[in-house]
Structures are given as C-alpha cells and as structure tokens.
Image: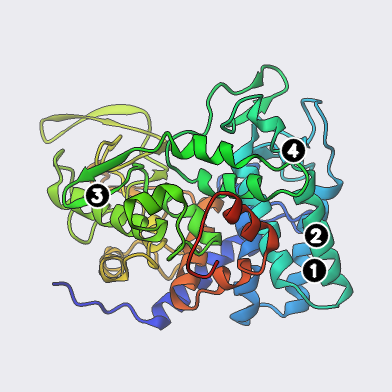
Amino acid sequence: MYCVTITDAHLDTLQWVSLIYYLRESNPENGLVADKTLKGSPASIAAVGFSLATAPVVVEREILEREQAARIVLKKLRFFRESPQGPEPDATGYKGFYYHFLDMKTGRRVWDCEISTVDTAFLIAGALTVAAYFDRDDPIEVQIRETAEFLYRRVDWKWATNGAAALTHGWRPETGFIRYRYEGYDEALLLYVLALGSPTYGLDPSSYAAWTSSFQWKQIYDWEYLYSGPLFTHQLSHLFIDLKEIRDPFMRTRGIDYFENSRRATYVQRAYAIHNPLEFAMYGETCWGFTACDGPGWLSKSVNGIERRFYDYLARGAPFGPDDGTIAPWVVVASLPFAPEIVLPTIQHFNSLDLGMTDSYGFKTSFNPTFEVEGSHCGWVSPYYFGIDQGPLVLMIENYRTGLLWSVTKRSPWIVRGLRQAGFQGGWL
C-alpha cells in the first residue's frame, strides 16, 4: 500500500498552475483559447467551453474578482454570438454549431475542419455553467445569462441528426454530414442531454434510447461496467453534471449509476497497467492513465529487441488499446471524484517523477517511458500543453473537493430538463 502524501495544498497548487493556461493562452480581444502551446496553434472551441466552466473556480478560489471574471466571460460569449454563422466555408459556425478549430485572431474556420457537434456541446455546457453561476442583477451578469441563453437556443440539434435518430459527429460545407454518428457509450452523454433539453430544436427521447441501445456492457478483470476504452470518455460529461445516484433506463437495469461506472472504468485502467500484457516500461499500480493524448509520433522502433509501434495524437484506451506505452497524468487527476484512493497515490508517483506538477500549466500532458530519450528518465515527454486537458483537471479537482461545478449546473433548467427527457430519475433530481 502506497502512502498518500498529496495534500489539499498540493491540489491547490496543481489547480492554480493548470489554470494559468487559460489566462496566458487566450486572445484577450475575443476570448478564444489556443488548442495547444505550439506556436501558431488555432483555437479549440472545446477549450473555450472548459475555460468558461472554470470561471466559478476562479472566483470562488479568489484568483480573480467576480466582476473581472464576469467581464472576461462576457467577452468570450459575445464573440460567439457576433461571429458569422452560415454555410460559407470560412464562417465561424453554422446552425448554431461551431467549427472545431478557429483562427485565434479572426475566429474563422481553419484546416478545413468540421462543424463539431460534441465540441459545440462542451462550448454550450460552459456557457450554461456561467449563466447559472453569474446570477446577480448586475448588468454584466444579466448579459452573460442572456447571451448564453441565445447561444443555446440557436443550436439546431435536429439538423445535426441528418434525418436519423443518433447525432452525427459533424458537418463540412464541402462534403456535408460526416458519416459517423455518436453510437456506443462515450462523452456524448453530455451532448445528448443538451440536445434533449433544448427549448427550440430539442431531440425526441427516442433519440437517447437509440443511443443507449448501442451500449456495450462488459466484464473486464473483476469489474462489470459500461465499456469505453479511453478514460476521458468516462469523465467529460461528469465535469458538468453530477451523475451520482441518478439513473437513466439503461443504468436502472444494471443497478448502478454513471458515477459508479466511471469509478469502475478508472479501476480497470489501473488493473490493465498492473497486468501490463504488452510489457511497457513503468506501468503499474501507480503509473497508468490511457486516453486521447499526444504521443511520440507515427513510427516504429525496436526497443529491447521488441518492434514497437508508436502513435502521435490518438485516443488510447484500456484494456483493448490502442496502446503504445503513453501515459497521460492529467486524465488520472480528472478521475479524483471517482476513486481518490487510487488516484492520489498515482498523483504522488507522477510528482516523484518530476513531471512538472508545480510548474506553469502543471503536469506534462503525456509521457512514454518505453520510447527512450537520452537524458530523460521518463522517456519521451510531450513538449506541448493542450487546452482540452487543463479544464478537466481543474474542474474535477474542484468537484472532488467541493462539488462546485455540480452545484452550479443543478441550477440550470435546461440541463435538468435534458436529464429528465433522457429518463433520469432519483437522487438530486
């Protein structure tokens, strides 16, 4: 048994240094947040959504005054309200949705990327969070609520189904709808809740039933749970929604809730690292965390006589892979609310590896000790930080300690409506 020495003060520091990303890697003119620290990186709309959701933390932890935080929030929301919407290939969005990546200065689409349904959901969830939090009569806070409401009401969720039950991944002006749909359990729980709760273009509950009908219930090691490989898929909806002790029809038949499911998924990740069937370096009881993250690159390399294949940015998962030996500390921290008894010792171990827990932006995004690099005891270490990693870490530390974000979003009538439309019952509902 490892001695847990991570204290509340350590979590304070990790939360603060991780938050610095959103203060430094944002355009102060429009509030857009860089996807990553690579020079010239475009903005990520999901990163903007997560940065919005951190505003209650920033205020309650007395990092910024409430009025200052409110002004920053309003600037971000106003940009999305005023930016061009339309079918043109250089717009910012269409049908209330937004392109996955935007130019940091102009806010226009880059890289021929897609209108992203799930990334728009993270953006809208951030907007609804600040709308629920900034509830005073102050003119700025009134505008925050009005603008967030406008953005949510404008999203045409029905259009995004392209005539079927399940939501599509997105749309491109050159080729139309992406052929993939959100089927099988993943972070789309939040997406469906927002789509079901909409007062303007809301989906029918049958759409949610169609989604859950594609779920895979598995027994892996000693755990039965609703399977999804990458750990982030078991976390991102929980950033915004307290899913403890509330159950939809699917989970009622299984006798657990999604919070317990995420706890089991976290334990499966650790069990996989302990088993370490592919014999990657350093995997073990306090060294795990397999998710979508940066990697050493698309290449093959012989390591100790074994031909290894490595990947760049990819959604890694456990126990069925893909896996190339890459570990992401941030995703372990984001499981704090589910399983602190195994997460805290792992954070302590990562800290002992000198992975930058107290540096600006916090833990290194990912590392791969199997991919040896001269002079590095952790092998390959990502040179970048990502905006979509910082938010989950910050928000889940807060939810673990105070439940702040959950208490805020329980006041959002649209999130509550979406949960009820999906058939959730019990607990705080």
Amino acid type shown at disc 4: Asp
The residue drawn where x is 25% and y is 57% is 267
> 10 Å neighbourhood of mark 3: few (<14), some, or many (≥20)?
some
Q: Amino acid at mark 1?
A: Arg
Answer yes or no: is residue 375 visible.
Answer: no
Which numbered disc covers residue 375? none
Q: Which residue is at 49% across, 46% downward?
A: 187
Q: Nearer the viewer, residue 34 or 38?
A: 34
Residue type, label 3:
Glu
Q: Nearer the viewer, mark 2 or mark 3?
A: 3
Tell me if label 4 and label 1 are in contact, CB under 8 Å. Answer: no
Between marks 4 and 1 in the image, the one whose residue lies nearer the viewer: 4
Q: Which residue is mark 2?
A: 75
The image quadrant of residue 76 is bottom right
Give the CA distance from mark 2 to mark 1.
6 Å
Q: CA distance from mark 3 to mark 1?
A: 46 Å
Q: Quadrant of residue 39?
A: top right
Indicate the quadrant containing the C terminus: top left, top right, bottom left or bottom right: bottom right
At mark 4, the secondary structure is: loop
Q: Which residue is mark 4?
A: 156
Q: Are marks 4 and 3 in contact (CB under 8 Å)?
A: no
Question: Alpha-carbon neighbours of circle 4 within 10 Å: few (<14), some, or many (≥20)?
Answer: some
Q: Which mark identifies residue 224?
A: 3
Work out how far the residue at label 2 is from the one at label 4, CA to CA, in angstroms: 23 Å
User: Which residue corresponds to mark 1?
Assistant: 71
* Whether residue 19 is situated above or below residue 95 in the rendered picture: below
Q: Are marks 2 and 1 in contact (CB under 8 Å)?
A: yes
Q: Residue at x 51, y 39 (%)?
A: 209
- Residue 288 is situated, as x and y percent measured from the top left of the image, at 26, 54
Mark 2 vs 3, N-terminal side? 2
Q: Secondary structure at mark 3?
A: strand
